[in-house]
Each structure stands twice: as structure tokens, then as C-alpha cells.
Image (tube, grey):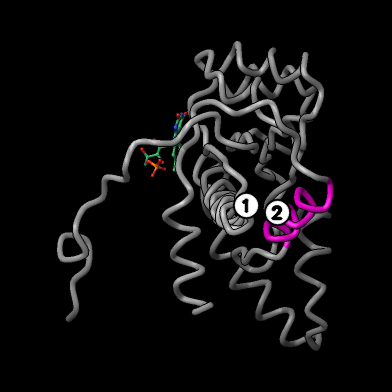
């Protein structure tokens, strides 16, 4: 089949699923989705994320209770919680390890580190936390697209109280914060038709 059609079919298939059927995702399919996240691009290659897969039903229900009671959480097969890293300053051990992976010469590394310091160290904590979250959203999009490509549904969820989710999952908040929830599973019913702006409204060529 035409690759462009296959890809766009997946884009049309994906929708923000509000309720999942009682059907589990196979382990290898879940791993395929997570692999799409792991391989995602990130600024400076820092991989400012961590993926927690919640399979425990009680935990899913506790999280749903602090996420506007959204039923797609407790009915999902697997609830992905994406944590954004806060230890992304140039002084942080995790980040130093990530930046050192490129195998640059000492001079090149020093130059690279200076660019990194300019970009990250001079900014306030909130800006940097949001910067990490932006990277998480790229991984999130790739995972939802990968899932759709193999017929698995998802819903990106920002409607939750992050501090409560952090507490339920005992997240070490000196290092991480919950960025996004994505329940995965199989749709319980067919969605409404997609509603999008026209190509003309969203694209300009200059
Ligand atoms: C960052 C982000 C956060 C979202 N949060 C929620 C949410 O909390 N609950 C929900 O049902 N949908 C949520 N959505 C889904 C959007 O409402 C949905 O993608 C949009 O209305 C378009 O519909 P479609 O994805 O079904 O095509 C979120 C989407 C994004 C990208």
C-alpha cells in the first residue's frame, strides 16, 4: 500500500478516545508504542522524559479521581504517565552524562557545553520545566501516532492535578514532574467525524 496513505490513514484513525473497551493491548504492541517514544528527538539529545506504564487498576482509578474523573483513564488497557525531567541544568549528573555521549573532542565539547549553558542555565526553573515538557509532547505525539498505525487508540490528557498524580505515583519531584497522561486501549465506540481548520487556514507559503 502507498506509504503516504498508510500514514494519513493512521492520522485519521487517531482520535481522543473518551472510553475504552475491555480489551488488553498485547505486550509486544505496547513495547512497539514505547519504542516510538524512546526513539523520539529531544533538544540537545537530553531525553528529558521518563515513561511510567500504569497497569494496576486501583492506581488508574486513583489517578482518574484527580483527572476530572475522565473515564478513559480507568477503562484503558495501559495508562502511560510521561514524566518531564527537572535535572537538566548543565551541573546535573544526568544531563552531563547525556551531553557527554556524543564523543566530541574536549574543545568541541567545551563549545557545545557553552551553548547548552547559554540556552538552559540562564533561564528560570519554570521555563526550563516547560522546556522539558515540550520534549515530552514530541515523544507523546510519536507514541500516539505509532499506536494509531497499528489500530490502537489513545487520548492525550492534560486535565489532571499534577501534584496529586506525582503524590499517587510517589514521583521524586526534585527530579521529575508529571507532564502528560496517555491512556491506551481500544475504542468502545466510533468517534464523531474529525473537525479541523482547512489547509489554507493553517498553512501559508512565503
Ligand atoms: C496537550 C493536550 C491535552 C489534552 N487534554 C485532554 C483532556 O484532558 N481530556 C480529553 O478528553 N481530551 C484532551 N485532549 C484531546 C483534544 O481535546 C483533542 O485532541 C482535540 O479536541 C481534537 O480531537 P481529536 O484528537 O479526537 O481529533 C488533549 C489534547 C492535547 C494535545
Instruction: Indicate the position of residue 169 as horizontal and vertical percent values.
Output: 77, 23
Placement of the C terminus among the 4 image quadrants: bottom left
Instruction: Indicate the position of residue 162 as horizontal and vertical percent values.
Output: 59, 24
Q: Which residues are magenta?
A: 27-38
- Badge 2, how many Cα within 10 Å: few under 14, some, many 20+? many
Residue named by callout 2 = 33
Residue 122, picture quadrant: bottom right
Residue 20, picture quadrant: top right
Residue 96, picture quadrant: bottom right
Where 169 falls versus 90 (above or below)?
above
Q: Residue at x 69, y 49 (%)?
A: 49
Label 2 vs label 1: CA separation? 6 Å
Q: Nearer the viewer, residue 162 or 44?
A: 162
Q: Mark 2 or mark 1, which has the lower sequence index?
A: 2
- Badge 1, how many Cα within 10 Å: few under 14, some, many 20+? many
Instruction: Indicate the position of residue 182 as horizontal and vertical percent values.
Output: 60, 37
Magenta region, mostly helix, strand or loop? helix
Query: For numbered disc 2, what is the local secondary structure?
Result: helix
Tell me, for residue 147, which label it has, or none. Answer: 1
State if disc 1 and disc 2 touch (CB < 8 Å).
Answer: yes
Q: Is residue 31 magenta?
A: yes
Q: Residue at x 54, y 50 (%)?
A: 137
Q: Is residue 175 left or right of residue 206?
A: right
Amino acid at each position: 500500500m502507498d506509504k503516504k496513505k498508510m500514514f494519513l490513514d493512521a492520522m485519521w484513525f487517531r482520535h481522543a478516545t473518551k472510553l475504552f473497551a475491555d480489551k488488553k493491548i498485547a505486550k509486544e504492541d505496547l513495547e512497539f508504542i514505547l519504542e516510538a517514544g524512546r526513539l523520539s528527538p529531544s533538544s540537545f539529545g537530553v531525553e528529558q522524559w521518563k515513561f511510567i506504564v500504569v497497569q494496576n487498576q486501583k492506581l488508574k482509578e486513583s489517578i482518574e479521581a484527580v483527572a476530572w474523573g475522565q473515564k478513559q483513564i480507568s477503562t484503558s488497557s495501559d495508562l502511560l504517565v510521561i514524566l518531564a525531567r527537572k535535572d537538566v541544568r548543565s551541573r546535573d549528573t544526568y544531563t552531563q552524562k547525556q551531553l557527554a555521549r556524543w564523543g566530541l573532542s574536549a574543545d568541541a565539547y567545551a563549545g557545545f557545553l557553552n551553548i547548552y549553558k547559554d540556552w538552559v542555565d540562564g533561564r528560570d526553573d519554570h521555563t526550563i520545566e516547560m522546556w522539558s515538557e515540550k520534549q515530552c509532547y514530541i515523544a507523546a505525539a510519536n507514541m500516539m501516532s505509532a499506536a494509531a498505525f497499528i489500530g490502537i487508540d489513545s487520548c492525550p490528557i492534560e486535565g489532571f492535578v499534577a501534584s496529586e498524580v506525582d503524590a499517587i505515583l510517589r514521583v521524586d519531584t526534585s527530579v521529575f514532574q508529571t507532564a502528560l497522561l496517555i491512556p491506551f486501549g481500544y475504542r468502545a465506540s466510533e468517534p464523531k467525524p474529525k473537525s479541523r481548520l482547512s489547509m489554507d487556514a493553517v498553512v501559508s507559503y512565503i
